[in-house]
Image (cartoon, helix red, strand yellow):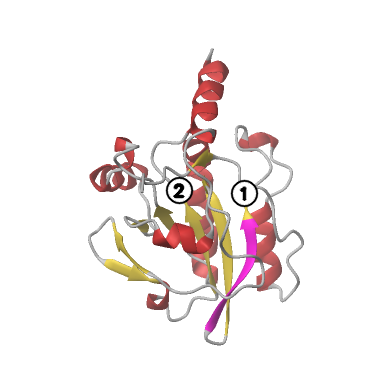
């Protein structure tokens, strides 16, 4: 019964929202942005002067996939923030379409989950469109090259959203480990698996 409920919720998520076809590809230079964090402060990637790169994740409160990946996202930040690759999570869902993704709900959710990383609201959805994000979660691994941020990996976190114990490929971890070792990223792009971002009707 639990699997059936999960499956039905996933179908609803995957079929909502309109996909954005434009956005960053591997090798592109990512632009900085400024968005409001759950603590009320405005955050930019340039705030991290010593960062070697970033794990930018378009996420939300409500998607079953996001919930399944939540502990793994927390673990990614715990493992890599000290190595210069912090997680920066962004919620671009339209709260009118998804009331559970309102800013107040984001604040509550981040406190409940004990987020030690920024959880930013993309109210205009301009950052999600700039990146080309389509799903939650949707990951972009960036590395700092001089004054630029290069897109090194785009896609999903690993190869099993539903069951962490069955994961055989940890794409994000492999990408960052390679970058830290000065090597090429072994897999640069995968299909983002998750709920469609809830776009505004405009």
Name the spot of residue 17 as percent of width and height, x first: 47, 40
Name the spot of residue 184 as percent of width and height, x first: 75, 70
Whether pointer 1 and pointer 2 mark residues with C-beta atoms closer than 8 Å, the reply is: no
Q: Is residue 140 above or below residue 30?
A: above
Q: Residue at x 45, y 48 (%)?
A: 59
Crowding near pointer 1: few (<14 within 10 Å), some, many (20+)?
A: many
Q: Residue at x 37, y 59 (%)?
A: 118
Viewer can see residue 78:
no
Query: 52 or 22: which is nearer to us?
Result: 22
Q: Which residue is mark 2?
A: 59
Q: Which residue is mark 1?
A: 156
Disc 1/disc 2 C-alpha distance (Å):
11 Å
Q: Residue at x 34, y 37 (%)?
A: 97
Which segment did they paint magenta?
148-154
Name the spot of residue 140 as percent of width and height, x first: 57, 60
Q: Is residue 62 above or below residue 82?
A: above
């Amino acid at each position: 019964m639990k699997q059936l409920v999960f499956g039905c919720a996933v179908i609803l998520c995957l079929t909502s929202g309109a996909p954005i076809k434009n956005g960053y590809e591997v090798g592109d230079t990512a632009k900085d942005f400024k968005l409001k964090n759950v603590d009320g402060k405005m955050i930019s990637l340039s705030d991290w002067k010593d960062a070697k790169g970033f794990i930018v994740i378009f996420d939300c409160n409500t998607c079953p996939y996001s919930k399944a990946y939540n502990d793994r996202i927390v673990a990614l930040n715990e493992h890599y923030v000290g190595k210069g690759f912090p997680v920066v999570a962004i919620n671009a869902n339209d709260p009118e379409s998804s009331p559970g993704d309102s800013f107040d709900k984001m604040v509550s959710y981040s406190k409940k989950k004990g987020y030690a990383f920024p959880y930013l609201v993309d109210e205009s959805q301009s950052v999600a469109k700039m990146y080309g994000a389509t799903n939650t979660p949707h990951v972009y691994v960036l590395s700092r090259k001089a004054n630029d941020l290069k897109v090194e990996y785009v896609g999903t976190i690993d190869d099993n959203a539903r069951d962490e114990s069955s994961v055989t490929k940890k794409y994000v971890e492999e990408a960052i480990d390679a970058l830290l070792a000065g090597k090429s990223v072994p897999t640069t792009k995968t299909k983002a698996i998750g709920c469609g971002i809830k776009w505004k009707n405009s």
